[in-house]
Image (tube, helix red, strand yellow):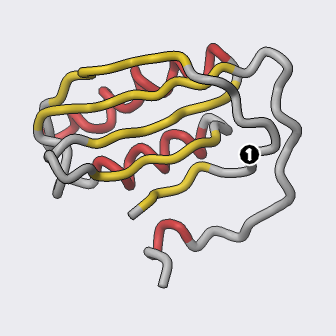
Amino acid sequence: MSPFWNRERRTEAAPTPENAKRLHVRFVGRVQGVGFRWTASMVARRLSLTGWVRNELDGSVTAEVQGEPEHVGAFFSQMLEEMSRGGRTSYTIDERDEVPVVRGEGEFEVRY
């Protein structure tokens, strides 16, 4: 069963922007058990980004974020703003690599 925040009505995927950028990112710090994946999903959807986010066994969180370059950049500043509210977490980006764009990807998902 899908988590409640992933039950949004799915619509047909919008075309992948020609200038799309995709980043593979590893977040470390206090990122599990604090709503990090849910927040990443909310921010990505708000910015019309696609990709995924998941917890890793070592306590980190990995994500791939894809979309218009300015929206991908805004993802990081909005995540910092959202996660710093109420002192919920402290994290750093351990890895950040540009990876090939996935054409036709239609959503941002929380993976398990």
Asked if 29 appears above or below 40 in the picture, the reply is: above
Which amino acid type is shown beneath numbered disc 1? Glu
- Point out residue 110 in the picture as x, y percentages from the top left corner: 46, 57
- The residue depicted at 52 percent of the width and 24 percent of the height is 23
* Quadrant of residue 63 within the rendered picture: top left
Q: Residues within 10 Å of mark 1 (few under 14, many from 20)?
A: some
Lateral position of residue 48 relative to residue 14, left or right: left
Residue pictured at 11% horizontal, 40% vertical: 30
Measured as percent of width and height from the top left, residue 99 is found at: 57, 22
Residue 32 screen position, x and y as percent: 18, 51
81 or 102, which is in the foreground? 102
Q: 37 left or right of 34? A: right
Task: Write down the residue under mark 1.
Answer: 105
Secondary-structure class at tag 1: loop
Residue 22 in which image quadrant = top right
Task: Please state the horizontal and vertical placement of residue 87, each as a whole percent of the image.
Answer: 11, 38
Screen quadrant of the C terminus: bottom left
Q: Residue at x 31, y 20 (%)?
A: 95
What's the residue at 51%, 47% (across, down)?
Answer: 52
